[in-house]
Image (cartoon, helix red, strand yellow):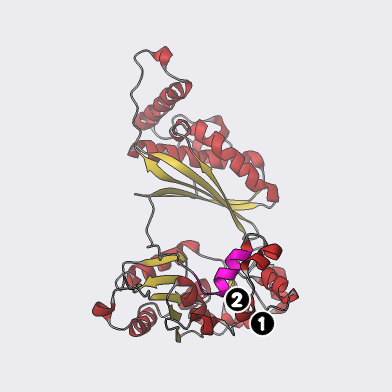
Amino acid sequence: MAEIIRHIVHLDVPDFCAALEQLRRPELNRRPLALAEPGARSIIQGVNAVSRSEGVQEGMPLIRARRLCRRLEVVPPDLLFYKQQHRRIVQDLIRFSPRVEGTLPGRYFIDLTGTGRLWGAPSDMACRVEERLEEDMRLQGRVGLGGNKLISQVAANSVTPGDLCHVFPGGETTFLRPLPVTLLPGVGFKTALRLADFNIQQVGQLAGISPGDLSVVFGSMGNRLARLARGFDPTPVVPYQETPRLSLVRNLDRREMDRERLEAFLFQQVEEAGWALRRHNRYPGRAMLEVRYADGITAQVRRKLSSAAAHVDRRLFSVMRPALHQLMERRVAFRRLVLELSCFTMPIRQRALFSWEEPGDIQDGDLQGALDEARRRFGRNAVFWGRTFATDPEKAEGTDASPRNLEITFRF
C-alpha cells in the first residue's frame, strides 16, 4: 500500500494579542505597544513588532521595559476578547477542513490531506487561508506547508507575515539543514546556549549527531532533539473542540494577600459552583484553580475530584484550599481567582434502606440538600457560612445577589 502524503498547513499570526489591540485602537499603530497589568511589579505579557525592535520582550518587568522604551504604550490584556477572536478564527478555518487544531491563540494547524478534489492544490489552499484571514479579521499571518506539523511550523516561522513557505515531500532534510536550531519547536534560549557550547548552531549539525550521544548531555530530551533535527513528527492534527466546563472568575477589587480573605473568596466560588452543578445534576471529575498575580503572571493548579467531594461544598473546598495555599507560596498579591470544573458525569447511586447505613458523605449531602432547599425557598442569602460573611457586605444587608465581581460561565 502506498504511503499517504500528508499536507499540513501552519498558520501563525505574530503577536496575536497585540495585533488585536491595534485593530481595536488604530491610534496604537506604529507605536510601541505592550500588554501588562498596571503596577510597578507587572510583567510584560505581549508586545508588537515596534516594541520588539526597541528591545522589549515578553516576560520582561514593566519597569525595565519603560527604561528601554520611554514612549511605550501599556494596555491591560483582555483575555476574554482574545479567546473570542481565537474561537472565531477556528470556526472560520473549519470551513476548509474538519481537522483544525488551535491550542494556542494565533497558531493553527490545518490538515488538508485528502481535500485536493474539493479545494485544489494544497499550496493554493494555503494561500486562500491566509487571504481569508486578512479579509475577515484584518490580520496578517505567515503560512507554512509541509508533510507534518513540525515541518509546517518551521516553514511558517521562516518567512515574514503575508508569505508562504512550501516544503515539498522529500525535501525536509535539505530545508532544515541550514536553519538555526532556535527555529525548532522547544529549543529555547537555554538549550541553544548548551548546543552552542558544542559548536552546534545549525539544524544540519544537530542532525549529524546520534541520539545516544545527545542523550549523554541532554538526558531524555536528547531523543526528542534528534527527531526534531531530522524532521520526524508523526503527531496528528487534533481538532479543536469546546470541552464542557463550569468557570467562575472572581476579579478582586484590590490586590489581595490576606489568606483568610482569599479562602473566603474561594469558598464563595465553590458555593456558586456547587449550586449550579446540583441544579444541572452533574458531578465534576477535575478542578483547576488559576490565579493572576499583581505583576501579571498567571499560575494554575489542577486537582482530580472524587464523587464524595464533588457534590458537597465543604468537601470540594477542602480539596481546593491546599491548591490555593500552593499558589500563595509565591508571596505576590492576587488580582484574580478562576475556579474551573470539568469532566462532568451524572450521579448514579441507590441509597441505603436505613439512615445509619449511609456513609458520612451521604449525611453531608443531606445537610447540603437542606441548605439548598432553604436558599431556594427564602433566597440565596437566607443561609450562608460565617466564613464568607466578612468578605461580602451585601450579605449583611440580606440582599439576594451573587458575590460581586463573580463571572459564571457554564458550557455543556
- When the figure is inspected, residue 330 is found, relative to residue 31, above or below; the finding is above
Give x and y (percent) for residue 215.
66, 63
Count numbered badges in the picture: 2
Three-letter amino acid code of the residue under disc 2: Ala
Give x and y (percent) for residue 257.
67, 47
Q: Secondary structure at mark 1?
A: loop
Q: Secondary structure at mark 2?
A: helix
Give x and y (percent) for residue 326.
64, 44
Q: Quadrant of residue 390?
A: top right
As measured in the structure, the alpha-carbon distance from the residue carrying label 1 to the one carrying label 2 is 34 Å
Which of 75/307 is in front? Answer: 307
- Check the image and name the residue furthest to the front: 1
- When the figure is inspected, residue 398 is found, relative to residue 229, above or below; the finding is above
Residue at (44% x, 75% y) in the render:
10
Q: Quadrant of the N terminus?
A: bottom left
- Check the image and name the residue furthest to the left: 117
Three-letter amino acid code of the residue under disc 1: Glu
Q: Earlier in the sequence, mark 1 or mark 2?
A: 1
- Near mark 2 (Cα within 10 A), the count class, few <14, some 14-19 or many ≥20, is many
Q: Which residues are magenta?
A: 222-232
Residue 229 in the magenta stretch? The answer is: yes
Left or right placement of residue 25 versus residue 189 in this view: left
Which of 249/214 is in front? Answer: 214
Left or right placement of residue 23 versus residue 350 in this view: right
Q: Which residue is mark 2?
A: 207
- Check the image and name the residue furthest to the right: 197
- Near mark 1 (Cα within 10 A), the count class, few <14, some 14-19 or many ≥20, is few
Q: Which residue is mark 1?
A: 54
Left or right placement of residue 362 versus residue 43 in this view: left
